[in-house]
Amino acid sequence: MYRSIITTKEGVRQQKVLEGMTCTKECPECHGTRLNERVRSCRIGGKNLAEVVAMPIGEAMDWVGSIDHPLATDLKNELHKRLKALCDIGLGYLSLSRGTGTLSGGEAQRIKIAKYINSPLTDMAYVLDEPSVGLHPQDISRLKQSLLHLRDHGNTLLIVEHHREIIAMADHIVDMGPGAGDHGGLVTFQGGYGPLLASDTVTGRMLRHRTPLKEHFRQPKGWYHVGDASLHNLKHFDVDIPQGVITVIAGVAGSGKSSLMEQFMQQESSPLVFIGQKDIGINLRSTPATYLNIADTIRHLFAKEGVSDKPVRTRPSTQLFSFNSKGACPACKGKGVIVSDMAFMESIETVCEECHGTRYNHEALQYRYHGKTIAEVMDLTVEEALSFFAGQSFLSQLRMLQKVGLGYLHLNQSMSTLSGGELQRVKLADRLYSTAIHVSAEETRLSSGHTYIIDEPTDGLHLDDVRRLQALFDEMADAGNTLILIEHSLDVMKQADYLIELGPGGGGDGGQLLYSGTPDGILHTQQSVTAPYLRESL
């Protein structure tokens, strides 16, 4: 019964409730190795299978190399090639037993790339969606070599990317735009990197622009202290984090940035706001309108002021205008799509033929508010809704979405279609609204005194979007808030007030405090891994 509840979709949705009733502990028999006693009793070179897969990949390579039995020759060569591919792409700090659910999106994608590096297949087309996500500039250099290896093996690589260095290495570039959402969808440039730099597209202008190093830094209003940082791979150091300014936590992938923030949140008793990319519950039915709690207000407007195409005796209930209730299309049950389970293949989604993707039934669609049906209103973009609902009280929530650069989203857009960066900014907009000072329906000011910890906020963002987001961060700091950003973007580092770098490597080779101070000071720090890339970008 336990497993039947926990592992179902309903169990996932009720996870917070179930956490209070259940607990997870390490198995006392296998001590978390998941292997039985017979397997653990078999040893090579004094180590059993559980001990080997728990090693960092670099150490596992050395262990494989130490085996000298003649029957292991072919296996050794194959294992060495596969493990070396993982090290070459910057994942040598991982262990083979690491759960895939604990990997970042960038780590999971690089594992896939490493899998194909030694593949004998040629004339393949690989489509990579932002492989640079979550990577330090040093890791980018390793990634470039792996991508070039795949290309030189006779394959075609199609890369969706925003990073300067990955764009620069491309043989052919297609620039889409000019804006996002309904403002995009056009090819604004095709050609090489040189002509792109000389072009007048948004991408061309941003690639030409070099963000200068900040000259005047905000002064801290106080300090947070993290004592004896020792969580996971952290090497027992103390560090102070300034309050009232923008602090960037830098370092190569796996250096301990997230571990430091995790220990900080465990030690700090004052309220903190953590905004990551994995802590938003999403499904086919969740939309920006439902997440920000403005869908109910819109349904009330339809129930109160909606005009029916047909004579009606009584006013409809608000439930009629919900695709999760009485207004749901009977065919797709309010999902807008029909999901066909293909057993061992990926499920197939097709647009519902009954409602044509609107999610609503015929009765709900017969009512109009200012000339639009509920489906047409919910299909408005945030920018369009700001104009359509002029004067309504919930516009401040929409303005927050626009402020974080998501004005192109549709109110009814399924949250499952959003990227990790978009989901993160939706949550940021919600947090900013919930803590804002609401002067009037038309004016909302950011409140002060809050501490935000944001995990890689620029992931998946165009250089121009990074600039806009940086302006928002400056506005939040100027209002009296503390921002702690786990970040790899050099542009964000150059505009920060304080910089903390961990490293020098990942996993066991990381976890050391390399630098703590204003960004200009790191340029002269010999042990810094980031400094050379920061100097080069100036």
Image (tube, rainbow, N blue to C red):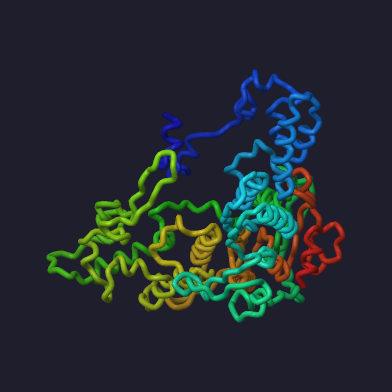
Where 303 falls versus 212 (above or below)? above
Residue 533 visible in the snapshot: yes
Q: Which image quarter is the N terminus in?
A: top left
Residue 458 place in picture, x, y as percent: 61, 63
Residue 425 locus on image (x, y percent): 53, 63
Percent x, y of residue 123: 59, 52
Residue occupying the point 69% across, 56% down: 148
Looking at the image, residue 458 sits to the left or right of residue 63; the answer is left
Q: Is residue 185 above or below residue 251?
A: below
Which residue occupies the foreground of this view, 47 or 110? 110
Residue 272 image offset from top left, x and y in percent: 60, 56
Residue in the picture at 21% in, 61% down: 362
Tell me where residue 54 sits by quadrant: top right
* Viewer-nearest residue: 60 or 301: 60
From the viewer's side, name the closer residue of 465 and 224: 465
Query: Can the viewer see residue 267 in this picture?
Result: no
Residue at 19% from the left image edge and 65% from the top image edge: 315
Question: In the visual, does 382 lie left or right of 523?
Answer: left
| Total numbered badges shown on the rendered structure | 0
Q: Residue 6 is drawn in which quadrant? A: top left
279 or 164, which is in the foreground?
164
What quarter of the picture does the C terminus occupy?
A: bottom right
